[in-house]
């Protein structure tokens, strides 16, 4: 678990560092400018971090499932090598997903100017600047990514259904409360992350507005990475004892 938490912390730090510092610098200098290649790099690293993070959250759900539902097989199913391979798969999947989206998005011709109504380079905002007939490939990629994210979310839900069934058989009330509390907080972050990300990228144009787009972007790009340390560290007695 702590190995996966280390990876999650790095990805959280990376996702926030990709967007927030540039936004703060622009506010201090009273500008909204970003270079073309800077925008491409920002989009790539942001998509890479949030994609890898969600795949890693899926892996962590499996880790908790094995630890609680199959504790005698934990060392066999999730040894050091298996954990490294699963973390590498999460990072690799995020990298490939980000590479495909970035390459495809910035190969599209921009016909509607170069001003984004967002505090960072976001795919839906970039697509608004593209010619109306040229962004269907990127829309298809977004739909595939949304389906992949939904599949991960369903896997997490199924894993936690099995976990809850196992936890309900724990004789200690304190043990049940601790397990339920941790699981519910994790599921809340995953739900917030997935629902806001899907809504931000697939919401109908008829309900789009600058304020709504900004609020949704902050919810899925800033709030989950900021909340994760509170969930996995500050409320974890074992981590406090180690410190």
Image (cartoon, rainbow, N blue to C red):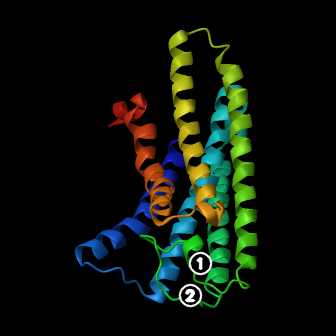
Looking at the image, which residue is at 51% across and 22% down? 178
State the quadrant of the N terminus.
Answer: top right
116 sits to left or right of 129: left
Q: CA distance from mark 1 to mark 2?
A: 7 Å
**For residue 227, above or below residue 66:** below
**For residue 174, above or below residue 85:** above
Percent x, y of residue 52: 59, 59
SS label for mark 2:
loop
237 sits to left or right of 93: left
Q: Is residue 212 visible?
A: yes
Which quarter of the picture shows residue 234?
top left
Whichever of callouts 1 and 2 sits on the residue coming sooner in the sequence is: 2
| Label 1: few (<14), some (14–19) or many (≥20) C-alpha neighbours in 10 Å | some
Q: Is residue 70 visible?
A: no
SS label for mark 1:
loop
Residue at numbered disc 1: 128
Looking at the image, which residue is at 69% across and 46% down? 153
Percent x, y of residue 78: 67, 42
Residue at numbered disc 2: 112
**Which dot marks residue 138?**
none
State the quadrant of the C terminus.
Answer: top left
Percent x, y of residue 61: 64, 40
Looking at the image, which residue is at 55% across and 60% down? 50
């Amino acid at each position: 678990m702590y190995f996966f938490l280390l990876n999650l912390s790095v990805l959280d730090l990376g996702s926030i560092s990709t967007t927030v510092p540039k936004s703060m610098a622009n506010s201090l200098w009273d500008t909204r400018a970003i270079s073309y290649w800077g925008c491409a790099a920002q989009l790539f690293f942001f998509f890479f971090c949030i994609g890898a993070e969600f795949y890693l959250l899926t892996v962590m759900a499996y880790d908790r499932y094995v630890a609680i539902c199959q504790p005698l097989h934990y060392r066999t199913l999730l040894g050091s090598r298996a954990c490294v391979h699963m973390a590498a798969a999460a990072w690799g999947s995020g990298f490939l997903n980000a590479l495909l989206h970035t390459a495809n998005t910035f190969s599209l011709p921009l016909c509607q100017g170069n001003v984004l109504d967002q505090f960072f380079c976001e795919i839906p905002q970039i697509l608004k600047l593209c010619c109306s007939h040229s962004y269907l490939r990127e829309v298809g990629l977004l739909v595939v990514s949304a389906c992949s994210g939904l599949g991960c979310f369903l896997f997490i839900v199924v894993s936690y259904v099995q976990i809850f069934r196992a936890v309900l058989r724990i004789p200690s009330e304190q043990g049940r409360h601790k397990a339920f509390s941790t699981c519910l907080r994790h599921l809340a972050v995953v739900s917030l992350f997935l629902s806001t990300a899907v809504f931000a990228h697939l919401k109908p144009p008829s309900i789009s507005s600058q304020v709504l787009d900004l609020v949704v972007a902050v919810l899925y790009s800033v709030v989950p990475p900021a909340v994760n340390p509170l969930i996995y560290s500050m409320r974890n007695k074992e981590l406090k004892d180690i410190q």
